[in-house]
Amino acid sequence: MPFAFILLIFFPFSLSRSTEFTHQQMNGPRAVRENGNSNRRSSSSVIDIYPLSCYYFGSKGSISSQNETIADRVLRMKANYDAHGMRNCVAAVIAVELFKHPHLLLLQEQNAIYKLPGGRSRPGETDIDCLRRKLSSKLSVGEDGRGPEWEVGECLGMWWKPDFETVLYPYRPPNMKWPKECTKIFLVKLPPSRRFIVPKNFRLLAIPLSQLYDNEETYGQILSGIPHLLSKFTFNFVES
């Protein structure tokens, strides 16, 4: 069995600042404890989330990534737009329970920016197929479909880029005739157990919603807004 460890970094007032994991395997859940009044909620507005300890975390070989300057990225995006039109991207919101609080699984490359698992769609590829492919590529052994299928749920929101810079809008501005990029965020529900196999050049972190909220300076526009998108749901914590 590979060596296992969890790194916990705490900040004041009890919740962890972030949790990083590489190799870990724990037991599965045994009972459900509901957080909130389900009688007032439909089943579609209730999310069952499982403890972080229910999942196995390992690593695999590094995958290629774009190591470029902002100017180089703008040139690449312009060339891609000229060839294929608007760039379509998808991202996954994946929640686990830690310290009786929802945490999101985020990727971080070389201590750089935080981001949701996901990526750019291929020409003619559906959003769901793209997201499943990207999740398998970045969080599983490979793209061959081994293991449980990713359960992609509803679209939580869409972000638009009017140009090739980094400014994003959670709506399509009325003066935006030809948007350059659209990013759709989907809820992805986890089963009681799953193996997460992450490329060595990425870190997989569990970040509490309380830390993401209104923290655009650290996490950017999209991530800091996710607590708002999830506020319509009730979380059921499944005890291990």
Image (tube, rainbow, N blue to C red):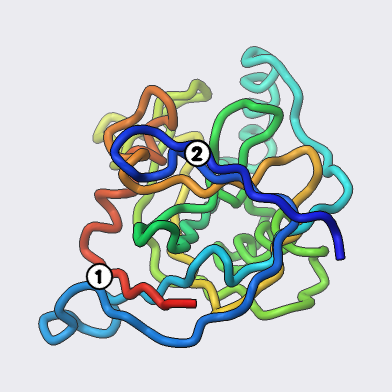
| Secondary structure category for the residue under label 1 | strand
Residue located farthest toward the left when viewing the structure as drawn: 40
Say if residue 88 shows up in the picture: no
Residue drawn where x is 86% and y is 66% of the image: 1
Q: Quadrant of residue 233?
A: bottom left
Residue depicted at 35% across the width and 39% down the height: 211
Packing grade of label 2 (10 A; few <14, some 14-19, many >=20) is: many
The percent position of residue 148, horizontal first and vertical second, equals: 67, 80
Q: Is residue 30 above or below residue 220?
A: below
In this orientation, does residue 222 appear?
Answer: yes
Using the image, determine if residue 186 lies above or below residue 144.
Answer: above
Residue 2 to residue 119: above or below: below
Residue at 47 percent of width and 62 percent of height: 96
Q: Residue at x 11, y 81 (%)?
A: 40
- The x and y percentages for residue 176 are 34, 32
Q: Is residue 49 left or right of residue 173?
A: right
Q: Which residue is mark 1?
A: 234
Mark 1 Cα shell of 10 Å, populated few (<14), some (14-19), many (≥20) = many
Type of amino acid under label 2? Glu
Left or right: 21 in relation to 172: right
Cα separation between marks 1 and 2: 31 Å
**Label pair 1/2, CB-CB below 8 angstroms:** no
Residue identified by numbered label 2: 181
Instruction: Look at the picture and state if 148 lies above or below 70.
Output: below
The kind of residue tagged 1 is Thr
Which of discs 1 and 2 lies nearer the camera? The answer is 1
Lower position in the chain sequence, tag 1 or tag 2: 2
Element under disc 2: strand
Image coordinates for residue 128, horizontal then vertical, percent: 56, 67
